[in-house]
């Protein structure tokens, strides 16, 4: 082998020249090709040049996979960076990178790379999921929102993000992480789609839209000529998430745009993630008048959490507006939801489902059996036993703690202003004793809660109170334009001014116009079809709902009034029993009331009320009930009580407090009637049973009130507990 430095001949196999010491060119032992000094593998055939050298690394394998690619780019960042110190810009960019990565990963995506201030992410690799396209679109909407919020915090309203999402086949490098995972035209297409999006918007391709439109609302964005594409490409603008994953629980009636509460929703989201990340219990109290948007805010939170990759245990319970509350009803509803127990399931079947559910939550059989006894007492599916309140609270707390050890656990209490004091005590107890668990407790209440319980939540360390104020004129205009794009400006202004910032007022006005045929559906919105110039809009929300009820025909009005006596939710069978009308005759009337957005059908598969009908707004139920004459009110409450006794039984079941309230309302409606004495005795006995039921659950204050009400209805000495 000749040395290229000095020309001396060297024997084969030497690495350095024996004459001058220079590195020698190396011949491949396999093919004879010359290689540069220091090469370990032949540049011609890839064989090792040294016998001891390891084989060359295998080229990474690639495969074709269906993926969704997101490409997002900041708008306005260059101008922002020119006006700020370089170190501040670097910190801002780092914060943006971390925020973008966190959002993408929460939805199950993987950041492939950051290019300047742009981000590229992929769904479908290394793990593919059936809803990857939907998750990518959800992430795009979230990125647009968080960047807008970041611009607001920095005093840079021009800072925005535009996002493109496309779905299709791409070459995916197996096992690769980060840059180089995905290659092909799909990546370039995502970047091109992003480039034609307006700042603050998300554009998606056809395959992405088709795969996600069940849960996300889209608007046609027209066809666009993209660089590298021979034909124009149809694109759609993602507007908002409208349902759970896969389109489950999508609203079937009129749903207004979510406006004016973006800051509150962002805060609640951040508090939820802090609870999850820090494994620390938190309480968020959302307070506002009827119709101000508490339920809508919670619905947006629930849709958001449902779309996350992380498993979250969601529970929702409603406090009933009977008397002064029904002991722990909302808590029992949450346990039923977790165990998959329907509202009217028999005790034996309910107990079996409870046992099966706890078997997946508790590893220790002794601990499971201890908790099961006390949860069965809560649900009224077991013989009443003499447990102390601390004993019951300890078991119920342990149930939620074990869930929180498996994943973040949310407990949403609706209508807390109607809660019995014992339920508030349990929430306090839970937050005190379970503070080291990822328990996120959210309560919705009207301002009356503060009047009844002034100290509520104020002593908790991790307590946040949100008071929802009326929406601004700008937000109300955006809401009405989104609902009714064809509404004349003067009518919109009249509705806005009358609403005084209460979104439900605006929505109910639109529903009234629909009822009267003055509006007709048109695509995703509605257009005016009649003369609205002389429209008289009721001045208050109460009067507006009453006017809608007055527009119903006689059969519809009768059904809505009967339903109001049964409560906010009811079954078709219960309504048939109350009205003595066959279910098949009720069905078309109920369908009409659902279409008119007065009633809804519970479709959440997790809810114990699945399949039940319910009032879309609690205020509608209350107004429909209050319009009944005293005579009608008495007859219907009496019929409701007897129906519930026949269905559930008259003994100390969990429904006994509701039965007692119906008998008491029937008696109070006409205390001078001929059957008043008999009815008073029945109401007294029912109240006594309700007292015993509350006492068995440790709700002693509630039990005392029931016993006092029972004593008021008799000339005999007060009943003993």
Image (cartoon, helix red, strand yellow):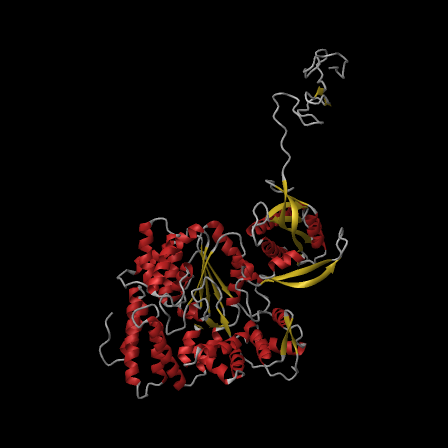
Instruction: Give the camera-side residue of 41 and 511.
Output: 41
Q: How many marks?
A: 0
549 to 64, vertically: above or below = below
Residue 258: which quarter of the image?
bottom right
The picture places residue 612, in percent across and down from the top left corner, at 45, 70
Residue 442 seen in the figure: yes
Residue 567 seen in the figure: no
534 to 222, vertically: above or below = below
Residue 524: which quarter of the image?
bottom right
Instruction: Give the camera-side residue of 207 and 90.
Output: 207
In the rendered image, the quadrant that contains the N terminus is: top right
Most distant residue in the left direction: 717
Instruction: Give the camera-side residue of 150 and 384.
Output: 384
What residue is drawn where x is 71% and y is 20%?
Answer: 27
The picture places residue 254, in percent across and down from the top left corner, at 57, 71
> In this image, 458 relative to 117: left or right?
left
118 to 16, vertically: above or below = below
The picture places residue 625, in percent across and down from the top left corner, at 44, 80
What residue is drawn where x is 64% and y is 78%?
Answer: 491
């Amino acid at each position: 082998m000749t040395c290229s430095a000095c020309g001396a001949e060297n024997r084969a196999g030497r690495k350095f020249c024996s004459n001058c010491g220079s590195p020698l060119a190396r011949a491949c032992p396999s093919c004879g090709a010359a290689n540069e000094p220091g090469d370990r593998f032949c540049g011609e055939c890839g064989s090792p040049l040294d016998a001891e050298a390891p084989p060359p690394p295998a080229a990474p394998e690639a495969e074709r996979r269906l993926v969704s690619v997101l490409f997002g780019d900041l708008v306005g960042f260059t101008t922002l960076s020119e006006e700020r110190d370089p170190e501040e810009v670097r910190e801002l960019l780092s914060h943006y990178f971390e925020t973008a990565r966190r959002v993408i990963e929460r939805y199950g995506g993987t950041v492939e790379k950051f290019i300047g201030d742009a981000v590229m992410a992929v769904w479908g690799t290394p793990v593919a999921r059936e809803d990857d396209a939907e998750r990518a679109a959800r992430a795009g909407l979230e990125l647009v929102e968080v960047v807008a919020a970041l611009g607001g915090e920095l005093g840079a309203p021009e800072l925005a993000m535009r996002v493109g999402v496309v779905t299709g086949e791409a070459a995916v490098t197996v096992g690769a992480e980060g840059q180089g995972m995905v290659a092909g035209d799909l990546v370039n297409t995502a970047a091109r789609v992003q480039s034609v999006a307006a700042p603050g918007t998300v554009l998606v391709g056809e395959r992405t839209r088709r795969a996600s439109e069940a849960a996300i609302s889209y608007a046609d964005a027209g066809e666009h000529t993209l660089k590298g594409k021979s034909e124009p490409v149809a694109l759609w603008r993602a507007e908002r998430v409208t349902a759970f994953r896969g389109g489950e629980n999508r609203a079937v009636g009129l749903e207004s745009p979510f406006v004016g509460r973006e800051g509150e929703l962002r805060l609640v989201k951040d508090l939820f993630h802090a609870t999850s990340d820090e494994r620390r219990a938190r309480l968020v109290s959302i307070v506002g008048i009827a119709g101000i948007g508490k339920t809508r805010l919670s619905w947006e939170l629930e849709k958001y959490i449902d779309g996350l990759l992380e498993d979250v245990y969601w529970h929702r319970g409603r406090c009933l507006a009977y008397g002064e509350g029904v002991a722990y009803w909302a808590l029992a509803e949450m346990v039923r939801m977790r165990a998959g127990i329907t509202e009217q399931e028999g005790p034996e079947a309910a107990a079996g489902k409870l046992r099966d559910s706890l078997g997946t939550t508790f590893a220790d059989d002794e601990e499971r059996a201890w908790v099961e006894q006390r949860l069965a007492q809560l649900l009224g599916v077991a013989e009443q036993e003499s447990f102390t309140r601390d004993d019951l609270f300890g078991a119920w707390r342990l149930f939620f703690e074990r869930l929180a050890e498996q994943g973040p656990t949310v407990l949403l209490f609706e209508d807390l202003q109607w809660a019995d004091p014992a339920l508030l005590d349990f929430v306090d107890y839970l937050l005190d004793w379970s503070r080291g668990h990822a328990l996120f407790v959210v309560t919705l209440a009207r301002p009356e809660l503060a009047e009844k319980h002034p100290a509520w939540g104020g002593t908790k360390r991790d307590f946040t109170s949100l008071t929802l104020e009326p929406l601004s004129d700008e937000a109300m205009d955006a809401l009405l334009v989104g609902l009714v794009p064809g509404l004349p400006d003067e009518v919109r202004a009249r509705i806005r001014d009358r609403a005084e910032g209460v979104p439900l007022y605006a929505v109910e006005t639109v529903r009234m116009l629909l009822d009267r045929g003055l509006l007709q559906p048109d695509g995703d919105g509605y257009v005016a079809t009649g003369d609205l110039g002389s429209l008289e809009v009721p001045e208050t929300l109460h009067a507006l709902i009453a006017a809608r009820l007055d527009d119903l025909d006689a059969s519809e009005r009768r059904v809505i009034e009967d339903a109001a006596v049964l409560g906010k939710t009811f079954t078709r069978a219960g309504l048939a029993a109350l009205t003595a009308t066959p279910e098949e005759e009720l069905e078309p009337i109920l369908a009409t009331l659902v279409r008119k957005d007065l009633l809804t059908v519970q479709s959440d598969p997790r809810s114990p009320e699945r399949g039940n009908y319910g009032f879309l707004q609690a205020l509608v139920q209350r107004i429909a009930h209050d319009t009944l004459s005293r005579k009608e009110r008495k007859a219907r409450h009496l019929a409701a009580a007897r129906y519930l006794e026949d269905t559930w039984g008259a003994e100390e079941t969990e429904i006994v407090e509701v039965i007692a309230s119906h008998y008491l309302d029937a008696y109070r409606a006409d205390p001078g009637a001929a059957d008043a004495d008999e009815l008073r005795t029945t109401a007294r006995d029912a109240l006594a049973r309700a007292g015993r039921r509350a006492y068995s659950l440790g709700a002693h204050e509630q039990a005392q009130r029931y016993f006092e009400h029972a004593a008021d209805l008799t000339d005999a000495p007060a009943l003993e507990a």
